[in-house]
Image (cartoon, rainbow, N blue to C red):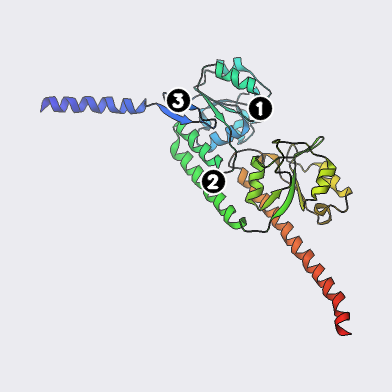
């Protein structure tokens, strides 16, 4: 009996220790397995959306450095910077002795990704493509940081709100729209981009979805030929870009004649973070305004047509 008790006592001491040091394995967005011996406690975030997702997952207190433009939430502004996607300070990153680095493949040069791999530190590559990927990203960040409960709650809330928007706008009449990133050069997005996914969520059809390049440049003539019913612009900051008004010069452009020139702050629609649904909410509401104006225009045309037909019917 004494031997049994002694064995039980030893097991009670050993098992929790083994569990505490159980290896954490997570698959990143490029199919690579990321392994950690323990939850990450010194995380370097190399993209603004990564920073936001880490905070959403409850791992904000474990971030030791971020990339340029990581400005949300407010606490992120106080963290040390290690450069932007054009150039990261690898020496500064290594000096921080991180136990996890998270980089954004689409926003980072392949040469920089290669140099990050050369550091031989745990590296998670983020490459989300769809709105729903935000929830799975938050969950995986929670696993890596040991904050699963917070991450699970955030992911659940995101999915619920996403589903609500989808159910509300799924069967709405399609609005043909042009999304303008910039004016010089005149830039847009194709159908593979996250923004196009948001547009589809709101019942909007990207008029340049079939172009092969993710962020193509187009001509004014191409936009006029496409004749979108709405034009959405993002620009560089929280202010509506002045160049959105350039479309006022073309009187036959439907988006202009119907006054469907809209603006959404870029951080709300360009970042793969929970705030993407704030941007989606705005876009969906804007597309609903387009539909209301369309119905009014159709009723006005019908009334005018009925008015012309009445004299002939009376003769």
Label 2 or label 3, whichever comes before in sequence order: 3
Residue pictured at 48% horizontal, 31% vertical: 27
For the C terminus, which image quadrant? bottom right
Label 1: how many Cα within 10 Å (few below 14, some 14–19, many 20+): some
View extreme (bottom): residue = 315
Q: What number is the disc on residue 68?
A: 1
Label 3 or label 1, whichever comes before in sequence order: 3
In this rendering, would 107 be left or right of 258? left
Q: How many marks?
A: 3
Looking at the image, do the residues carrying marks 3 and 1 touch, with CB atoms under 8 Å apart?
Answer: no
| Residue 237 location (% of width, % of height) | 73, 38
Using the image, determine if residue 281 lies above or below residue 5: below
Using the image, determine if residue 45 lies above or below residue 135: above
Label 1 or label 2, whichever comes before in sequence order: 1
Q: Quadrant of residue 221?
A: top right
| Residue 247 location (% of width, % of height) | 84, 47
Residue pictured at 66% horizontal, 53% vertical: 203
Identify residue for label 2: 158
Q: Dot 1 lies on which element?
A: loop
Identify residue for label 3: 35
| Residue 217 location (% of width, % of height) | 78, 36
Q: Nearer the viewer, residue 101 or 92?
A: 101
Circle 1 or circle 2, nearest the eye: 2
Q: Dot 3 lies on which element?
A: strand
Q: CA distance from mark 1 to mark 2?
A: 26 Å
Using the image, determine if residue 30 lies above or below residue 118: below
């Amino acid at each position: 009996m004494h031997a049994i008790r002694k064995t039980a006592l030893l097991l009670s001491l050993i098992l929790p220790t083994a569990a505490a040091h159980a290896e954490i394995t997570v698959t990143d967005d490029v199919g690579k397995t990321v392994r950690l011996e323990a939850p990450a406690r010194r995380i370097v975030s190399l993209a603004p959306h990564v920073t936001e997702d880490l905070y959403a997952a409850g791992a904000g207190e474990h971030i030791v450095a971020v990339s340029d433009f990581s400005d949300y939430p407010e606490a992120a502004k106080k963290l040390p910077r290690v450069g932007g996607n054009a150039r990261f300070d690898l020496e500064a990153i290594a000096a921080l002795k991180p136990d996890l680095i998270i980089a954004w493949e689409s926003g980072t040069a392949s040469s920089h990704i290669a140099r990050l791999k050369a550091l031989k530190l745990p590296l998670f590559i983020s490459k989300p493509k769809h709105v729903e990927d935000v929830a799975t990203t938050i969950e995986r960040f929670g696993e890596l940081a040991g904050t699963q409960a917070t991450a699970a709650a955030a992911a659940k809330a995101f999915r619920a709100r996403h589903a609500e928007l989808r159910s509300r706008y799924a069967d709405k009449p399609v609005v043909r729209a042009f999304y303008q990133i910039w004016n010089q050069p005149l830039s847009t997005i194709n159908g593979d981009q996250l923004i196009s996914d948001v547009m589809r969520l709101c019942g909007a059809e990207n008029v340049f979805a079939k172009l092969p390049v993710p962020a193509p440049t187009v001509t004014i003539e191409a936009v006029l030929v496409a004749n979108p019913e709405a034009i959405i612009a993002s620009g560089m900051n929280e202010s509506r870009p002045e160049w959105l008004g350039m479309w006022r010069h073309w009187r036959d452009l439907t988006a202009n004649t119907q006054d469907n020139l809209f603006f959404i702050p870029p951080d709300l629609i360009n970042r793969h973070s929970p705030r993407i649904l704030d941007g989606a909410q705005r876009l969906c509401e804007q597309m609903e305004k387009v539909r209301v104006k369309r119905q009014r225009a159709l009723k006005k045309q019908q009334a005018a047509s009925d008015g012309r037909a009445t004299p002939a019917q009376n003769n």
